Amino acid sequence: MSTWHLECSACDVREAGDTRATVCPKCGQPFLVIYDSLKASRDALTPRWDMWRYAPVLPLRDGEAPVSLGEGLTPMHELPTLAKEVGVARLWVKDEGLNPTASFKARGMSAAVTRARGLGVPGLVVPTAGNAGAALTAYGAAAGIPVRVYAPETTPKPILDTIRTLGADLQLVAGHIGDAGKQARGFSNESGYFDVSTLREPYRIEGKKTMGLELAEQLGWKLPTHIIYPTGGGTGLIGMWKVFGEMRDWGWLPKDVTMPHMVVAQASGCAPIVRAFKEGKDHATPWENPQTHASGLRVPGPLGDRLILRALRESNGDAHAVSEDTIRAATLRLSRSSGVDAAPEGGCALAVVEELVAAGRIPKDAEVLVFNTGSGASYRF
């Protein structure tokens, strides 16, 4: 299996791979996992039918079994009729709602809880807009590690019910996920529970990057021209951009591969990355009074803002926000055009494609992949 160390994403601090790391102690920015002399080939993929198929390029120790519930290897559906209607050459939707606990968060939590168990943590805590809390609760139960979750009172009820059913200590918070994050960090400091907030530990990125590995394999080791990613904390976008470079370095993709344009999709009621991108900034100012029914997008001040914006600029990407009514209409359109039970975040991604094509910011010959990051059933109550 692989060996790795941790490097700060913004300064020169390094840590060993067996460190119980949070953010960089020098500058407060996230750590990234950097692999040491990794020489795995595509032939080294395991016969597993979950994301740990890619174990040779994930943070797993020799002889270690991952904490897994069958996450990953989600389907990718091509939608030629919808592509024609939208005005692009090809259009796919990758349905992450079929993961355990019905969202893409399962990938990151599988990797994070695997490493947390290996580090011997006494418990796990997370603030959540919903799906991350459900996923952590499930993987904590699978690993035998107690979990506390802080969630806004406005979190969709089906997701809160899942968290309760799976046994977490659920704390409801007045306000948004930023308020939940403050309480989670306070509890972590008092209790010794390990904080697995988005980008406050380095391994959720590694789980999320498997989306990039999968889509490349599903397309015959090719990449689409554009990836539209509904962005709250942005770990998935950061992880995919990281692994595209890694695959090129490993020889899994050609050295001259054309990388996708990474496109952030946000709601107009909470669009800190869109605003920062338009203003040419390298960081995002927290959004005032964040409001959207797409709860996964209701992240006013993502810790990974610099990494998200860096990926957009390195990929010659884009960022766009759409209204609540537009999200609702596009969610229904995506579901009824594909058979995928789309979450509003997936609808937001489709709406962004439509508006960017209409504005000439995505060309007519584009081959576009839209991510549906969760299940629509989690939002109906």
Image (tube, grey):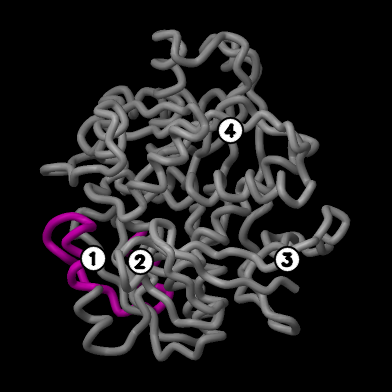
Of badges 4 and 3, the one in the foreground is 3
Q: Which residue is mark 3?
A: 37
Q: Is residue 214 visible?
A: yes
Q: Residue at x 40, y 85 (%)?
A: 146
Q: Is residue 174 magenta?
A: yes
* Sequence-first tag of 4 and 3: 3
3 vs 2, front mark: 3
Residue 284 in percent (x, y) is at 25, 43
Quick one: label 3 or label 1, which is nearer the N terminus?
A: 3
Real-space Cα distance between discs 3 and 1?
36 Å
Relative to 146, is 366 above or below? above
Q: Residues within 10 Å of mark 1 (few under 14, many from 20)?
A: many
Tell me where residue 86 appears, x and y as whole percent: 51, 13
Q: Amino acid at mark 3?
A: Ser
Find the distance from the CA under tag 4 to the CA under tag 3. 34 Å
Q: Earlier in the sequence, mark 2 or mark 4?
A: 4
* Region rendered in magenta: 159-184
Q: Position of residue 142 (x, y in %)?
A: 55, 79
Question: Circle 1 is placed at which residue position?
Answer: 181
Residue 93's label in the rendered image is 4
Give amino acid for label 4.
Val
Circle 1: residue type: Gly
Q: Nearer the viewer, mark 3 or mark 1?
A: 3
Q: With 212 as the anchor, is 113 left or right in this view?
A: left
Which residue corresponds to mark 2? 197
